[in-house]
Amino acid sequence: MMLRDDDLIEEFKKIAGFDLKGCYFQQVLESENIKKILFKKLRAPLAFTTKNRFVKLFLEIYKDLQESAKAYNEKLKAFQKYYEQLVKDTDVFYKRFDMSAILGFFSKLSSGEQPEIGKTEDKGQIYEELSSKLKIKKAPPPTAIYTEYGEQRPLRDISGDLIRLAKTAFDRHKKEGREGTFRPCYCEGLKDL
């Protein structure tokens, strides 16, 4: 319900400080299988007969969202540290094993007839070009690819506002809630990093 209503998404963002647009997965909205799995995990029926049942599920989903976002951010920080270490190790490797210096050293060691690579002046340039082509390109940092979610406000501080929002969502989409066509506003993708 929430993910189809921009007004509700904006209101949720104001209350919780979390943008649900990053949690929008079209597959969740369309797949009956995914919907059944999510509702089973949350121990909830596929349809709501009362507003209170919806509100309780809404608050339960918010708690799960907080835990998922926290775990996601921790994994992203660990990934970022690993990336930074990898960049340092790569730089150290290139300082220790400079390809143009190694090729230049081997050319000085060789004696006698050499297969001509080019003019003597061009060998240094050829070694540099070869060295640059053999270098591994750095990947973009994880924070450039993945979004870091900020700290969500504690449920105890915003539960009243969330309850009002959940009741508003239920009232706007009563038909979907009663027929069992409700799609949860759930951010399952946070756990996949």
Image (cartoon, grey):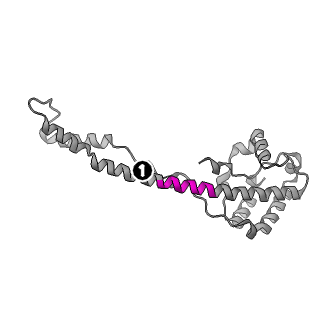
Query: Is residue 147 visible to the viewer in this orientation of the structure?
Result: no
Q: Where is residue 168 in the image (x, y as percent from the top left)?
A: 83, 61
- The segment highlighted magenta reads 70-81
Q: Would residue 84 be counted in the magenta stretch?
A: no
Q: Which quarter of the figure has residue 158? A: bottom right
Q: Position of residue 176 (x, y in %)?
A: 85, 49
Q: Residue at x 84, y 56 (%)?
A: 54
Q: Would residue 76 be counted in the magenta stretch?
A: yes
Q: Where is residue 150 in the image (x, y as percent from the top left)?
A: 61, 63
Question: Amino acid under label 1?
Answer: Leu
SS class, disc 1: helix
Reply above or below: 90 against 6.
above
**Nearer-the-camera pick, 109 or 113:** 109
Q: Position of residue 111 (x, y in %)?
A: 10, 33
Q: In this view, which residue lies farthest toward the right?
A: 49
Tell whether 15 sits left or right of 129: right
